[in-house]
Image (spheres, grey):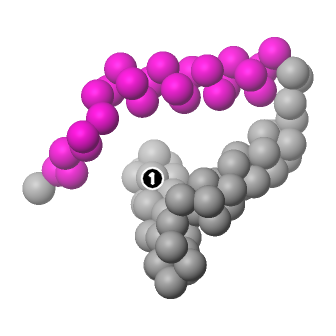
Amino acid sequence: MPIVSKYSTTQIENLVNQLLDTFHNNNATTELSLMCLGNAVSHVINSSVPASQRAAVANHFSQALADAINSKSN
């Protein structure tokens, strides 16, 4: 059963495109882009998730990332 998001595809695509445009406009390398995204994810988790749930959220996020990468390479 597919996961249904409470966010529209348009909302998601707009934000992703803004992020990618920022990286492109700043000539960010892959390494720098990943570092910035990692820092942003850490900030969101640390500032928005209760301490008792942070590890679980980080694990779910990393698993979702791995799943997304694996599904794209097949």
- Residues rendered magenta in the picture: 2-25
- The amino acid sitting under disc 1 is Ala
Q: Position of residue 7 (x, y in %)?
A: 30, 35
- Left or right: 57 in relation to 45: left
Residue 37's place in the image compared with 7, above or below, is below
Task: Determine the image quadrant of residue 18.
Answer: top right
Q: Residue visible at 54% across and 29% down?
A: 16
Q: Residue visible at 78% across and 40% down?
A: 33
Residue 54's place in the image compared with 22, above or below, is below
- Left or right: 48 in relation to 72: right
Q: Residue visible at 80% across and 51% down?
A: 35
Q: Position of residue 60 (x, y in %)?
A: 45, 70
- On the image, numbered disc 1 is attached to which residue? 68
Question: Which of the pair 7/70 is nearer the observer?
Answer: 7
Q: Is residue 44 magenta?
A: no
Mark 1: which secondary structure?
helix
- Left or right: 73 in relation to 18: left
Residue 36's place in the image compared with 14, above or below, is below
Q: Position of residue 41 (x, y in %)?
A: 63, 54
**From this viewpoint, is residue 66 visible?**
no
Q: Residue visible at 56% across and 78% down?
A: 51
Q: Is residue 12 magenta?
A: yes
**From this viewpoint, is residue 22 visible?**
yes
Task: Determine the image quadrant of residue 13.
Answer: top left
* Image quadrant containing the N terminus: bottom left
Question: Which of the pair 2/15 is nearer the observer?
Answer: 15
- Left or right: 54 in relation to 64: right
Q: What secondary structure characterizes most of the magenta part?
A: helix
